[in-house]
Amino acid sequence: QVQLTQSGGEVKKPGASVKVSCKASGYTFSSYAITWVRQAPGQGLEWMGWISAYSGHTNHAQKLQGRVTMTTDTSTRTAYMELRSLRSDDTAVYYCARGRGSSWSAMFDYWGQGTLVTVSS
Amino acid sequence: DIVMTQSPDSLAVSLGERATINCKSSQSVLYSSNNKNYLTWYQQKPGQPPKLLIYWASTRESGVADRFSGSGSGTDFTLTISSLQAEDVAVYYCQQHYILPCTFGQGTKLEI
């Protein structure tokens, strides 16, 4: 069965970086896109960006410009999201999700369990 | 960016009654070439990731109870739960994937 397994929670200081991993199983990794979505405590869902597991092409939200990098490692079937220059308002649960298709425009049919990133001094 | 606005923000419905959640997009998400609305509904229960319920505005995901239905086209969409069950307590989100960036509605909290 399809599964996305994310890395564990992190506590970081302001200005630091965090790298969250998302290991896929149960499907052909390179045939689908991976999208990253975050959710601040008690808040709604925020689309961060996506990456094609086939080509490595990415696109991310304008507000994260210069701070976020999304990558994949097809040999280990793992997607990564790195966020730099962390601020307190980056505190959130970060989700990876599989897009039903190889492109950004897709519904998200499987989700990781979420990774809580806490930014605090 | 396309702004997705849901109404109401919260909703209390009795067990067995109908629940209706609305979603309005700031511009059409209907792609004329394939006549598909790029509108998806998700359900999120506390402490869990979102779950795909409805895609293309009205297509129920496999395994989703048939009391859930989606309707609408263009800019106005509705998620309906025909007979509310206790396990339907959750926050519901609409989302468009017509134009980047993908955007979500603010969510509607459904309670008994």
Image (tube, coloured by chain):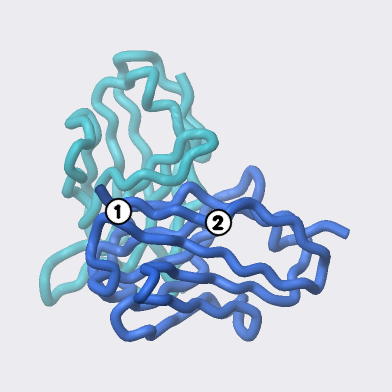
Chain colours: A blue, B cyan
Q: Amino acid at mark 2?
A: Ser
The vertical placement of A28 against B78, above or below, is: below
**Who is closer to the viewer here, A119 or B7?**
A119
The vertical placement of B51 against A102, above or below, is: above
Could you tell me if the residues under marks 1 and 2 are in contact, i.e. CB atoms within 8 Å?
Answer: no
Q: Residue at x 47, y 65 (%)?
A: A36
The residue carrying pointer 2 sits among few (fewer than 14), some (14 to 19) or many (20 or more) residues within 10 Å by Cα, namely: some
Direction from residue B83 to residue A45 in the image, left or right: right
Tell me where residue A58 appears, x and y as whole percent. 42, 82
**Who is closer to the viewer here, A64 or A58?**
A58
- Label 1 resides on the chain identified as A
Direction from residue A70 to residue B19 in the image, left or right: left
In the picture of the structure, the residue carrying the numbered disc 1 is A109
The residue carrying pointer 1 sits among few (fewer than 14), some (14 to 19) or many (20 or more) residues within 10 Å by Cα, namely: some
**Who is closer to the viewer here, B55 or A57?**
A57
Mark 1 or mark 2: whose residue is earlier in sequence: 2
Q: Amino acid at mark 1?
A: Asp
Q: Secondary structure at mark 1?
A: strand
Quarter the C terminus of chain B occupies = top left
To the question of a shared chain for discs 1 and 2, the answer is yes
- Label 2 resides on the chain identified as A
**Who is closer to the viewer here, B23 or A23?**
A23
**Visible residue check, residue B40:** no
Q: Residue at x 48, y 24 (%)?
A: B111
Q: Residue at x 42, y 73 (%)?
A: A50
Q: Residue furthest left?
A: B34
Between label 1 and label 2, give the one nearer the viewer.
2
Tell me where residue B50 appears, x and y as whole percent. 42, 46
Tell me where residue B47 appears, x and y as whole percent. 54, 37
In the picture of the structure, the residue carrying the numbered disc 2 is A7
Q: Secondary structure at mark 2?
A: loop
